[in-house]
Image (tube, rainbow, N blue to C red):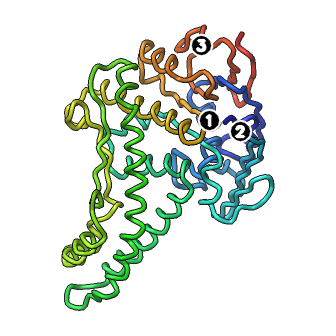
Amino acid sequence: MEITTLKLLNFRNFSNLELNFYEKKNIIIGSNGEGKTNIVEAIFVLALTKSFRTNDDNVLIKDGNSLYKIEGTIKDSFINNYKIIYQDNLKVVKINNNKVKKLSDYISNINVIMFSLNDLKLIKDTPSTRRKLINLEISELNNDYLKYLNYYNKILKQRNTYLKKANIDNVNINYLNILDEKLIEYGIKINKIRESYINDINTLINDIYKKIGFNANLKIYYKSDYNNMSIETLLTQYKNNIQKDVNFKSTQIGVHHDDFIFMLDGVDAKNFASEGQQKSAVIAFKLTELEIFYKKKDEYPILILDDLFSELDIKKIEKILNYINKNIQTFITTTDLKKLKKSYLSGSKVFELENGKIKESLYE
């Protein structure tokens, strides 16, 4: 899969921009603040309808304007045009100029694996951050997963709204039972898909971790209230937990509390691994995802490496780039081309940003 063209209107610092990308390596170079990350952010938004930097679409609109527009041509088995228009808190998505009614039906058409500085903090961060990442990646592979997740969150919101108003003396058990049955129905579906995805990750991640530099055993442990639980057992747990839920005014068990724990040699990497081991574990996770996407879709996703090399040494950079399949369309943002070997730069397209202008060149 590759993106051949990108057009931006009033997106971040770009009023009007059109770029034609190379099918393999695209290097975007510029000083901080020139907008190199904005370009790869636009590709990410085009694929997943949301930014990896903010949840507020309004900040993506260039100052003084009322909308932004992203348009791109994607080449895989076919060539299709994708478009996102955001105005007045309303997002419209189109494929070949045909409006797609549900965002869940749009997502999964364009596959992107994103690798940014924030991802290096994944192990140290909260369970919600790890769930968000897993949700994004699985949604690109499985359109039904996003629908199940939306249904689950809708029911969860309804249940929590009720709990905020209830007290233990007047709680409507029958009403909660109805909601619990629906939560469990979709929660089990989500749990099984997450479990399958992590199992796929675990078949590859340990070997990849060792190939990029560490002689330790890496595994992802999927922690969930739903693991190996029957419907009947879960219903009992929800019933037994009602007083606790009323006291906390929120639902205390469910897949919305799931976590994905990086284990190194059988212990939690968050508490016992060095910073270098943690970074390499996250890198191995991302590289494994590339292979999972290829296995599931018979083609590699678009790969984005955003300013990653500012946090890594030259040897680590070389190991990552040597591992990446040469047929993957890759975008790299950097402030310094010296971070990349000349042998890697050969055959790439370079976009140099300076003072609001972009200079394009082929690196021979």
Residue 76: mark: 2
Label 1 – label 2 distance at C-alpha = 8 Å
Residue 262 versus residue 244: which sits nearer the camera?
262
Circle nearer the viewer, 3 or 1: 1
Q: Which residue is drawn at 68% across and 34% down?
A: 2
Give the residue number, with chain letter if any, for mark 1.
299
Q: Which of marks 2 and 3 is nearer the N terminus?
A: 2
Relative horizontal placement of residue 305, taking residue 204 as reference (left or right): right
Mark 1 surroundings: few (<14), some (14-19) or many (≥20) residues within 10 A: some
Quadrant of the image containing the C terminus: top right
Q: Is residue 81 above or below residue 351?
A: below
Extreme residue toward the bottom, this view: 170
Q: Earlier in the sequence, mark 3 or mark 1?
A: 1
Which label is found at residue 344? 3
Give the left or right position of residue 322, taking residue 171 as reference. Answer: right
Residue in view at x 62 percent, y 35 percent: 299
Look at the numbered discs 1 and 2 and tell me whether their residues touch, using CB distance below 8 Å: yes
Asked if 364 appears above or below 180 in the picture, the reply is above
Q: Which of marks 2 and 3 is in front?
A: 2
Residue sitting at 59 percent across and 34 percent down? Answer: 300
Element assignment for label 3: helix
